[in-house]
Image (cartoon, rainbow, N blue to C red):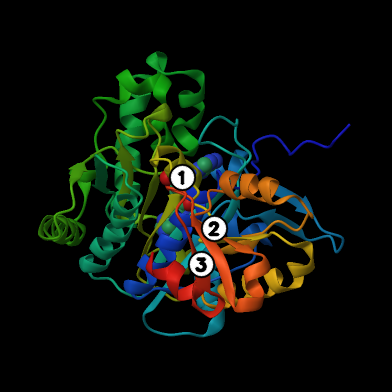
Amino acid sequence: MIPQAPKGTDDILPPASEGWRRLLRGFEDLAVRYGYGFTMTPLFEATELFSRGVGVETEVVEKQMYTFEDKGGRSITLRPEATASVVRAYLGSGTQGVFKGYYAGPMFRYEQPQSGRRRQFYQVGVEYLAEPSPDADVEVIEVGYRLLQQAGITEVTVRLNSIGDPADRAAYREALVAFLKDRADLLSDEARSRMSSNPLRVLDSKADASVVADAPAPLDAICEAAAAHFAGVVAGLQRRGIPYEISPRLVRGLDYYNRTVFEYVSAAYTAAQEALGGGGRYDPLAEMLGGPPVAAVGLAMGVDRIVLAMPKFPPGGPDVFVAVADPARREDAIGLVAALRDAGLWSEMDLGDRSLKAQFKVAGRRGSRLVAVVGDEWSEGLVTVRRMSDGEERPVAIEEVASWATNR
Ligand code: HAM
C-alpha cells in the first residue's frame, strides 16, 4: 500500500498551488515595502519556550502541541506559532532598538482537522519589536488588511479590541470569575472546569455563548494609558481607511497579549466563523521569556484559509513552447529553450521524442501562448512561430524569438 499523508496535512501541488505561489510572493513584496526583513527561526524549539511564552493554560499549549523527547533527552516541540521564536531570537541576538521582521512557514497544532483547520498549516506574519506607538499597531493591522485586498478577498473586517495592561487583565479576570460563578449551573462542564484555570477562554466557548453574552467586557475595564493607546489605534485605522469593528469580548487564545488584539474576518470565509488572521500587542512576552521589557506588536495570517477564500487563478502556461519537427535538430531546440529562459521567458519543450502533432497537443495542454517549431528553416536562421490563440504562423529569426515573444 502507498503510504498516506498524515491526517490534517496537505500536499500542495501544481496547478492548484498557483494561488499559494501568488499569495506568498505578494506577501514578501508587501512586507518588504513596509520595511520588514526576512526572518527565519527553527521549526522546532525547546518546549519551555511555548509553555512560558504562549502560556501553560492556553488551548494551544495544553492540547495542541507536537511534543517529543529527542535522542539527547530534551523536550522538543514543533512550533505551533512563530512569535515566541522571533522574540527569543531577538533577545538572543543582542539586538537593541527597533526590529521589524517577516516570516512565512509551516506551523503545527494537533487539532481536529477540517477544511481550513489543519495539523500542519502555513502562516505568514510580521513582528514589530521595541516600538510602543499605537501607529505601529495600525501599521501591522494595515499589512494584514492589504494582504487580503491583494489576494482579491472582499468584505474584510478587522475585529478590534483592547484587553488593557496586565493589571487590568488580572482585575478583569476576577470580575469575570465572579460573574461565571454566579451562573455556574448554566455553564457547560468544560466552561466550569476552565472557570478557575483560564476563565477568559470561556468567552470563546460556543456552547456558553448565551451565558457569556452579558459578561463584563475587557474593554470596559482598561486603565487610562491603555485607553489612550486604543484611541490612538482607532484614530489611525480611521485615517488609513481600514474598516474595523470593535469587538469588546475578543480576547484571543494566547497569554502574551496586552492592549490591542485583532482578527480579520471576511464574508468570503465563513467556515466555523474562524479568522483569516490575527494578532495584537504583546509587550509582556519578552519579560515572560526572562528578558528586559520590549514593546511589541505583530500578526500572523492563515495561508490555508486565505487560499480557500481567494478567487481561483488559472495556472497560466509557457510563453514559448519549443517543438522539434526534425529529430536531428533536438540539440538546437534544447539550446533555444535555454536561450529563451535566459531572456526571462517561461519556455519548455517535450523531451520524449514524440511526433510534431503530439508535441502540439502537449503544448496546448500546458496552456502555451506560442509554439516555436525547430525544423528545416533552422539552417536559414529561422523558426516557425505559431500563436496558439488563433493559429497564425510566421517565420521569425532565431535570435529574435525572445523579443518577439515578449512583445506579443
Ligand atoms: P493565531 O490566531 O493562533 O495567532 O493564528 C493566526 C492565524 O493562523 C489564524 O487566524 C488562522 O488563520 C491561522 N491558523 C491558526 N491555526 C490554524 C490551523 N490549525 N489551521 C489553519 N490555519 C490556522 C498566532 O499564531 C500569533 N502568533 C499571531 C501573532 C503574531 N500575534 C502577534 N504576532
> Could you say which quadrant of the image residue 270 lies in?
top left
* Residue bearing the label numbered 1: 314
What amino acid is found at the position of numbered circle 3 in the picture?
Pro
Mark 1 Cβ and ligand 1 under 8 Å apart: no
| Residue at the (49%, 61%) spot, across then down | 83
Q: Nearer the viewer, residue 230 or 238?
A: 238
Marks 2/1 in contact by CB < 8 Å: the verdict is no
Q: Nearer the viewer, residue 5 or 406?
A: 406
> Could you say which quadrant of the image residue 247 lies in?
top left
- Is 290 displayed left or right of 276 in the figure? right
| Residue at the (24%, 34%) spot, across then down | 216
Q: Residue 395: give its label.
A: 3
Image quarter (top left, top right, bottom left or bottom right) of the N terminus = top right
| Residue at the (32%, 39%) spot, across then down | 265
Mark 3 Cβ and ligand 1 under 8 Å apart: no
| Residue at the (24%, 37%) spot, across then down | 217
Q: Nearer the viewer, residue 134 or 290?
A: 134
> Tag 3, which secondary structure?
strand
What amino acid is found at the position of numbered circle 1 in the picture?
Pro
Estimate the spatial distance between the alpha carbons at disc 3 and disc 1, rounded to whole Å.
Answer: 30 Å
Q: Residue 263: x percent and y percent?
A: 33, 46
Instruction: Answer with mark 2 or mark 3, whichever residue precedes in sequence.
Output: 2
On the question of residue 58 being in view, the answer is: no
Q: Nearer the viewer, mark 2 or mark 1?
A: 2
From the viewer's perspective, is residue 352 above or below residue 195?
A: below
Q: Residue 277: give its label.
A: none
> Tag 2, which secondary structure?
loop
- Is 143 displayed left or right of 350 in the figure? left
Estimate the spatial distance between the alpha carbons at disc 2 and disc 1, rounded to whole Å.
Answer: 13 Å
* Residue bearing the label numbered 2: 318
From the viewer's perspective, is residue 86 above or below residue 278?
A: below
- Is 377 displayed left or right of 73 in the figure? left
